[in-house]
Amino acid sequence: MGVDELFTDEKAPGERAGRRSKQRNAQRHRQGFFRTIVQILGELLITAGVVLLLFIAWELWWTNIDANNAQQHAISAFAKEFQGPVAPVNSGAEPKDFGPPVVMADIDSPGKVFGVVYIPRFGATYSRPLVDGVAREQLDTLGLGRYATSTMPGGIGNFAVAGHRQTHGAVLDAIDSLVPGDKIYVQTKDGYYTYVFRNNQIVLPTRADVLLPVPTEAGAVPTERFMTMTSCNPRFGSEERIIAYSLLESWQPASAGPPAAIAAQVAANSSKG
């Protein structure tokens, strides 16, 4: 064996060990890099999850609290200006016919609160402001908004309103619980209008014909006094719309006091005004 061969044999194991060490270092480096990437992605996903949960909590909880406070303030302001007794004047007497209902002039003033809606089916203390307009700035804050193309409460034709179902006060959350015969009361400065729920309908968002003077009947001349409530469907979605139709049963002026069914809530609202 020559000297060169001897040195070659002596260096070979060291070189092989060096190569293996470099390979292990490279492998550890790659593993460390991928581990870091996975950790970063995991942290980003956790952060995104927390942000999503906070957003859902804000949508389903805080917007309701914020809107409820604004709506109660609006009801109190309306009650403070309302002129009329807060208890029935002829309690226990036979219902009186007050003739054709007084119908407010179209106010065409988006954002103006001009009434209060009471729906006992939704709870004994349910009362929500009635505001002109159905833009986000009205529905997200003040509750039930009147479509500008519809009539005013008590008018011949279609008095149509919209409201959120799960957020921003959830004013129509229980719209699907209405049953035929349920009463819906609308209070304005002129008095109280009693509508009776007839039926509901599930439609696509493009079905604007539900807002026609005679709902869903294009070209028909109205002879009745409708109330139409619209909201999103299902409860946590907006793929459809749920429509609730009612007909005016009676009305009474502010001087007669409220219907007995809502007298306690009218008085409660007045005491906060």
Image (spheres, helix red, strand yellow):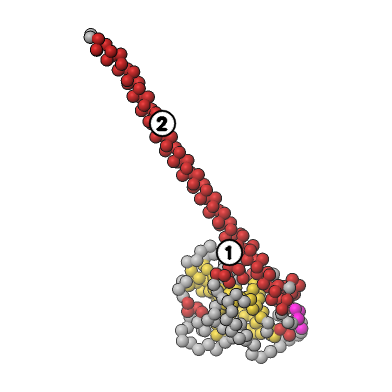
Residue under pointer 1: 167
The residue that appears at 73% across and 85% down in the rendered structure is: 255
Question: Any magenta on residue 87?
Answer: yes
Question: Any magenta on residue 97?
Answer: no
Magenta residues span 85-89
Between 50 and 10, the one lying in front of the other is: 10
The residue that appears at 65% across and 85% down in the rendered structure is: 250
Asked if residue 164 is positioned above or below residue 259 in the image, the reply reads above
Q: At label 1, which amino acid type do we have? A: Thr
Asked if residue 172 is positioned above or below residue 2 in the image, the reply reads below
The residue that appears at 46% across and 75% down in the rendered structure is: 207
Which quadrant holds residue 193? Answer: bottom right
Residue 168: give x, y in percent of width and height.
59, 65
Which quadrant holds residue 235? Answer: bottom right
Mark with earlier residue (1, 2): 2
Predominant secondary structure, magenta span:
loop
Q: At label 2, which amino acid type do we have? A: Arg
Residue under pointer 2: 28
Other-residue count near label 1 (Cα within 10 Å), few / some / many at <14 / 14–19 / ≥20:
many
